[in-house]
Amino acid sequence: MRRRRPLFAANWKMHKSPQEARAYVTAFLPEAESLVASVDIVLLAPFIDLECVCDALSGSTIGFGAQDCFWEREGAFTGEVSASMLKKIGCSHCVVGHSERRRLFGDTDETVGRKVTALLAEDITPIVCVGESLDENRAGRTAERVQEQLRAGLGYLSDAERAVLVIAYEPVWAIGTGLADNPKSANNTIQTIRSAAGGLGEARILYGGSMTAENSAAFCAESDIDGGLVGSASLDPNKFVRLIASATQVFDAR
Ligand code: PGA
């Protein structure tokens, strides 16, 4: 029997006002409620939407979370939001080390590690992103690169701490490009991730990078892919429901 419960996380990135977020949840909930019997669903919203999303989701088992955090609890850190603040507003998950943050905002494996620690201390599940660039992929360095990111970012955690993480394997060249990875090769990399460090053997590992309603089933039919971190195809509630529904059928058969 399959032990890992599938997870689909909507990464809205810098999209949606609080009003738009509320309208999304209102449209999403009636369709999505039947899916949560088989999978976990989390909406990862901009900070300003979290209160609205929390309110609109009340009474539902769909979770919500943020797309980044800072590792200190509070203080003179202009523009930042801490893991402890996210906890107070009810976040269950938080993305860490997304490639857009690594590339545009200076996140490093070391700062990713500090954020993971802060989130674990608040009992928020970190969704830790790893993935290779196009050059690294072409040079055959994919496995090496993701192992490096995991070692540097998570090396100091215990096996028990690593086991509660969610890892998102997102090849940088596949994000937002419409050029999804090949499901078999994504599965191979995810198998490498599972064996990269203690505790990850049974952790949930997602694929991310141009996942759509058309390809989610092919990814989720693979043995080690436990769901998706979905950007563009999560922005429309109906598309996101279709993406999850089509993957759910293959999980049930896997
Ligand atoms: P995408 O984004 O689905 O638009 O490729 C995925 C992500 O960045 O998490």
Image: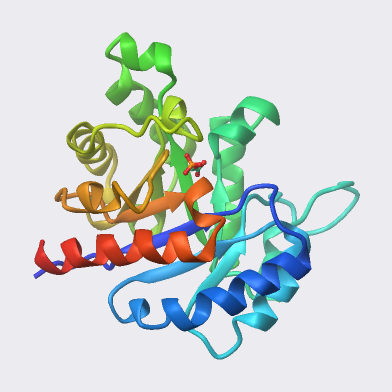
Front one among 70 and 32? 32
Side (left or right) of 171 relative to 108:
left
Front one among 233 and 219? 233
Residue drawn at x 42%, y 30% as measured from the top left: 174
Q: Position of residue 184 (x, y in %)?
A: 17, 36
Q: Position of residue 70 (x, y in %)?
A: 71, 49
Q: Is residue 53 above or below residue 116?
A: below
Side (left or right) of 15 relative to 137:
right
Q: Is residue 231 visible?
A: no
User: What colour-coding does the image apply?
Assistant: rainbow
Side (left or right) of 7 relative to 23:
left
Q: Is residue 225 above or below residue 240?
A: above
Identity of the residue furthest to the bottom in this view: 59
Front one among 52 and 92? 52
Residue drawn at x 24%, y 44% as measured from the top left: 194
Q: Position of residue 223 (x, y in %)?
A: 14, 50
How many dots with numbers? 0
Quadrant location of the C terminus? bottom left
Q: Is residue 104 visible?
A: yes
Q: Is residue 209 above or below residue 219?
A: above
Quadrant location of the N terminus? bottom left
Front one among 202 and 4? 4
Q: Residue 41 is drawn in which quadrant?
A: bottom left
Residue drawn at x 34%, y 76% as measured from the top left: 35
Q: Residue 81 is drawn in which quadrant?
A: bottom right
Q: Position of residue 130 (x, y in %)?
A: 43, 36
Residue drawn at x 64%, y 49% as measured from the top left: 68
